[in-house]
Every structure is written in C-alpha cells, then in structure tokens.
Image: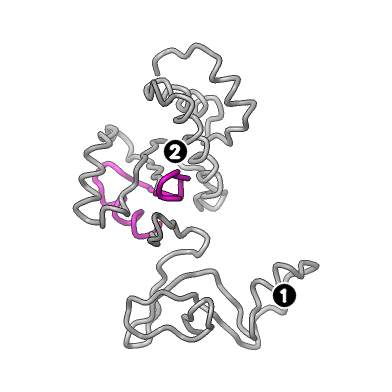
Amino acid sequence: RRSSDLKTMIPVPRDGTTVGEIMVRSNTVMKGYLKNEAATAKTLVGNWCLSGDLAVCHPDGAIEIKDRSKDIIISGGENISSLEVEEVLTQHPAVMLAAVVARPDPKWGETPCAFLELKPGAAQPDDKEVVAFCQARLARFKVPKVFIYGALPKTGTGKIQKFRLSGAARCHLRISRWHSVDPLQGRKVFSRLYRHHQSFPTCRSDELQLHNQEKLADP
C-alpha cells in the first residue's frame, strides 16, 4: 500500500502534510467490478487499486487518512477536508454528530455546509456562536457558511448518508435564492420540508413549488 499523487502515481513525500490517494495491490485485490468495465477502469489503474481515500504519509511510514476524495470541498481553489471540519464541530458541547458537505456558491464555487445533530436535551446554539467556535480552531475559509440542525439520515448500520445531505444543501441554496428578500421565510420553507419528509428533503422542483406556495405558520 502507499499514498501517491493522483496524476503521476508517484508516492508522496513522508512529510505528514502532502496529500495523496491510498493505493493497494496484492494477490487478494479484486479483478474488477462484475459487468461494469467503466468502474473497473476508474478503480484499477496501472496495476494499482485506487481506494478513494486521501491521506498523508508520516516519516515513520504511518498513513493518516484525511478524507474521501469525493467528499473534498474545493472553495476558491483551496481544498477543505470535510473530516477536519466535522472533528472540530463535534467538539462543541451541544453537538453529538456532524456531517459537512459542499454547498454550491456563486463566488467561491463551493463552501462548507454543516448538518448538526444535537445531544439529547441540548439547546440549539446560535450560528454566530458556532462560527466563533470554529474560527478559533480552523482557518477562516474552512468555517461552514450554513448550519442546519436535525437528525442526520443514516443507513441501517448507522453510517451517515452524505449523498442525501448533498442534495439537501443544494435544496437549501435554491430556497435561499427564492427568499433572498425574506431569509426568515426561507428558513420556514426548509423547516416545513424537513418536517414533511421526516428526513432531509430531496427537494425536487415540484416539492419546492408546492411548499413555496403555501402559507407557513411559525415553526
């Protein structure tokens, strides 16, 4: 196994900072995906199996996983590890679980959007408080711009379904644009969708139009 540059396939320096992708090869690695040549060609490259895990290699040879390649957030040309931001958010005394995904941004391309599941009995913190908490522990460009509170969608084994959160982040952006003049109304629409689905919404256009037209009572 090794952590290598994605373009050159050359192992990254053992400096604990240069990020590469973990690649493995052995006689126990799969031959490919059944009846899926495209996925096989993407995963098996140059006799190596690409894991999709981004990591750094330390001087003693130890590999430290930083994030999944598909979960990296690119904001203004800077790479942001969602795992790094999640680790900071879960240090907040009110937060039990955190998941961070990319939210489209017209200026920066993407910005971090944080979904937070609070501890039982914990009061929802003010967004400004959470921002200040993150700024004391992260570079400013890594601090989430949006915080959404609620139970996180999980699989039967307890794994957080980030693909659903990515859809919800895009949904939140669309609602924010529709209610740019009245941000409070936008929050109400998103909250209504959340309660309606009992999970983070997929926000199809027909659902958005239906809920946007309704008069919403205060949550």
Amino acid type assigned to the residue bearing label 1 in the image = Gly
| Residue 3 at x, y percent in the picture | 46, 80
Question: On the rendered structure, is 54 left or right of 84?
Answer: right
Disc 1 marks which residue? 32
Residue beneath the point at 33% across and 76% down: 17
| Residue 130 at x, y percent in the picture | 25, 42
Q: Are marks 2 and 1 in contact (CB under 8 Å)?
A: no
Label for residue 68? none
| Residue 111 at x, y percent in the picture | 40, 49
Residue beneath the point at 46% across and 42% down: 152
> Quick one: which residue is furthest to the right in this view?
35
Residue beneath the point at 38% across and 47% down: 97
**Residue 18 in which image quadrant:** bottom left
Disc 2 marks which residue? 151
| Magenta span includes 140 | no
For this rendering, which residue is in front, 20 or 28? 20
Q: Please determine whether, in this image, residue 65 is positioned above or below residue 29.
A: above
Residue beneath the point at 38% across and 74% down: 64
Amino acid type assigned to the residue bearing label 2 in the image = Ala
Q: Which residues are magenta?
A: 82-111
Q: Quadrant of the C terminus?
A: top left
- Mark 1 secondary-structure assignment: loop
| Residue 148 at x, y percent in the picture | 39, 37
Q: Please determine whether, in this image, residue 152 is positioned above or below residue 174.
A: below
| Magenta span includes 86 | yes
Within 10 angstroms of label 2, few (less than 14), some, or many (20 or more) residues? some
> Quick one: which residue is furthest to the front in this view?
107
CA gap, disc 2 and disc 1: 36 Å
Please indicate, yes or no, whether residue 100 appears anywhere in the rendered image: no
